[in-house]
Image (cartoon, rainbow, N blue to C red):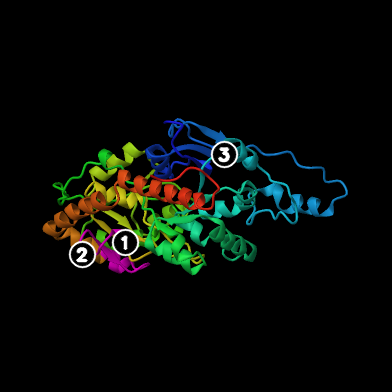
């Protein structure tokens, strides 16, 4: 990209984990700015080829002899970085990574910090640099660490210091405003879906009578997988050959396997583990329905708009999900999918059975699901919207005489 374009640092704790496809689409889709990725951990480089990527380096510890405060800080906080809240400059001027040095050397026009809790962790270093930054929130990072007063205080400072703040759904934006982010700083930035790689097809009941219902997610409580299994046991009474295909890995796997055995669903459940994008697309293409009964956890963790759900809809899969988080912003019940209350296997099963028993309704929701994603979540449109946020933030900074770069 031309060096004359505004330079944005994409700052990620990890670049990238397999489930972070949407971030990769964002950094590779930029056209009006150029970006360098800064990260603490560069992972899966073959899966996510990109240049330039700069790995942050840990700095040597200062001498601690005779300094009780510094010794305490390293013993209880720095050695397990990142801590639940960032280091305080009034306690210690030490920064654990060379982020400040890199930013001063590269002199970018803007830093985009991916994930709100990472913005809290990097806050002292960003303030030491003193340039403009924006933050994007993606879901769990909105509720993370809110039980820790020090973190909440720092989060409010992030809201104050950030030029603009992005989130993936209106429900997340509303929550950020409740937490103290000024409404005039908040900007929507939906997940970018690569429509050119997703071929839509209208779904019909399976010719062989064996329904394939797919769910793709991390195996964690928030995804409502145990609710799915209980609903499947109900559906099985009418459709004994029904297949539930679960794609993903995570800490809930042993509990899921135990529940499958307890409910007698061994012949109805396929657990395929983590799949790459092409393998996942193949599963979507042979399924008739996508399930995503998300639920709020006791830690108040909730979804934005799930990436996998949008990708499934783009292929024409009608969705049966819950009225949770940002899901109703993408799935309009009765139009492009069906929504039921959280943690209700009976109502989830009822919605599944409704579509399984009505071919015309299945086809209608299928067509509408693909059209909805095409109209509202295309990657090119969403990346362009993010670039608008970047250029606006740069312009805001320019009005204070701190940079010569401004949007067209």
The residue depicted at 39 percent of the width and 64 percent of the height is: 171
> Along the line of sight, which residue is nearer the eye, 156 or 22?
156
Q: For the C terminus, give its image quadrant.
A: top left
Label 3: which secondary element: loop
- In x, y percent, where is residue 142? 49, 60
- The residue beneath circle 1 is 329
Q: For the N terminus, give its image quadrant.
A: top left
Residue 357 in magenta? no
The residue depicted at 61 percent of the width and 60 percent of the height is: 154
Label at residue 107: 3
Identity of the residue furthest to the right in this view: 66
Q: Is residue 192 above or below residue 106?
A: below
The residue depicted at 32 percent of the width and 37 percent of the height is: 278
Distance from disc 2 to disc 3, alpha carbons, whole Å, reads 51 Å
Q: Nearer the viewer, mark 1 or mark 3?
A: 3
Q: Which residues are magenta?
A: 330-349
């Amino acid at each position: 990209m031309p060096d004359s374009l505004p330079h944005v640092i994409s700052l990620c704790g990890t670049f990238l984990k397999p489930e972070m496809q949407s971030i990769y689409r964002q950094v590779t889709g930029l056209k009006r700015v150029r970006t360098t990725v800064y990260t603490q951990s560069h992972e899966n480089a073959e899966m996510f080829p990109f240049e330039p990527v700069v790995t942050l380096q840990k700095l040597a510890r200062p001498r601690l002899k005779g300094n009780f405060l510094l010794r305490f800080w390293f013993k209880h906080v720095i050695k397990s970085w990142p801590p639940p809240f960032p280091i305080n400059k009034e306690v210690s001027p030490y920064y654990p990574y060379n982020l400040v040095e890199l930013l001063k050397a590269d002199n970018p026009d803007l830093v985009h910090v991916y994930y709100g809790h990472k913005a809290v962790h990097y806050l002292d270093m960003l303030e030491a640099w003193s340039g403009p930054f924006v933050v994007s929130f993606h879901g769990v990072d909105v509720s993370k660490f809110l039980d820790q007063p020090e973190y909440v205080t720092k989060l409010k400072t992030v809201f104050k210091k950030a030029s603009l703040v992005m989130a993936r759904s209106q429900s997340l934006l509303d929550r950020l405003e409740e937490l103290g982010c000024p409404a005039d700083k908040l900007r929507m930035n939906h997940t970018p879906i690569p429509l050119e790689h997703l071929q839509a097809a209208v779904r019909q009941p399976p010719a062989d009578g064996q329904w394939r219902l797919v769910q793709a997610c991390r195996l964690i409580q928030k995804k409502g997988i145990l609710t799915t299994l209980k609903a499947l046991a109900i559906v099985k009474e009418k459709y004994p050959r029904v297949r539930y295909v679960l794609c993903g890995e995570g800490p809930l796997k042993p509990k899921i396997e135990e529940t499958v055995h307890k409910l007698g669903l061994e012949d109805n459940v396929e657990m395929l583990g983590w799949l790459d994008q092409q393998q996942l697309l193949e599963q979507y293409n042979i399924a008739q329905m996508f399930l995503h009964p998300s639920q709020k956890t006791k830690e108040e963790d909730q979804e934005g708009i799930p990436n996998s759900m949008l990708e499934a809809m783009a292929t024409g899969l009608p969705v049966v999900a819950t009225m949770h988080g940002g899901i109703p912003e993408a799935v309009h019940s009765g139009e492009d999918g069906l929504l039921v209350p959280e943690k209700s296997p009976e109502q989830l099963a009822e919605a599944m059975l409704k579509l399984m028993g009505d071919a015309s309704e299945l086809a209608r929701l299928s067509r509408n699901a693909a059209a909805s994603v095409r109209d509202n979540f295309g990657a090119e449109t969403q990346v362009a919207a993010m670039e608008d946020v970047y250029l606006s933030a740069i312009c805001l900074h320019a009005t204070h005489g701190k940079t010569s770069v401004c949007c067209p």
